[in-house]
Amino acid sequence: MELTELTAKSRFERQIAGGDNMTIRGSCLCGAVSYEITGSFKVMGNCHCSICRKSHGAAFATWGIIDPDQFRWTSGETFVQAYESSPGRQRGFCQKCGTPLVSLHFGEVGEVVVGTVDDDPGMRPSEHIFVASKAPWHEISDTLPQFDEWPPEIDSSLTLEVR
């Protein structure tokens, strides 16, 4: 195994291991909705697909991947509206202020919009995904790995449609 393969593999394994001793809290812009995550994100990355760009009104969205059992709404769950952006995948946002909050996979929260986290989540993005469909006016200026679609350690047969 080459050093670059080893580094990428160990980076991914460290992210998947996560930490169990922390609590991450987040909320929407107006404060009507709040949530709590027990433990750390499994992976954090920047997605440049057109669905993320349009739903966030930005060049990319930064997502934190979690296990559904790590997540709970602490207030305002009744204000969370969901929109099915792909088959089996919904984007949850605050219906009062419009803040994008989560992605639900078949009804369970599996991703959190990192921009809604209230404090330091203890992790930084590790990659850019779907750069083949990034905004033509945006230049990625950091040194994080870039993938045209899903990174190789993600089994694309288990993923949902992304544009």
Image (tube, rainbow, N blue to C red):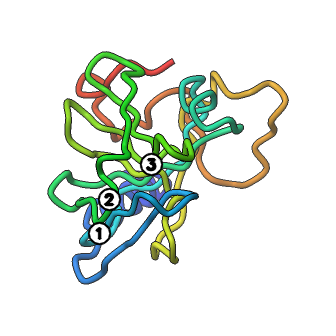
* CA gap, disc 3 and disc 2: 17 Å
Report the amino acid beneath label 2: Lys
User: For the residue labelled by badge 2, is the local secondary structure a helix, a strand or a loop?
Assistant: loop
Which residue is under mark 3?
101
Report the amino acid beneath label 3: Leu
| Apparent side of residue 139 relative to residue 37 in the rendered image (left or right) | right
* CA gap, disc 1 and disc 2: 5 Å
Q: Residue furthest right?
A: 137
Q: Point out the tag, 1 or 2, that comes first from the N-terminus.
A: 1
| Apparent side of residue 67 relative to residue 37 in the rendered image (left or right) | left
Report the amino acid beneath label 1: Gly
Mark closer to the observer (3, 1): 3
| Apparent side of residue 111 relative to residue 62 in the rendered image (left or right) | left
Which residue is under mark 1?
18
Mark 1 Cα within 10 Å, few/some/many (few <14, many 20+)? some
The residue drawn where x is 40% and y is 34% is 91
Q: Give 30 or 132, whichever is nearer the viewer.
A: 30
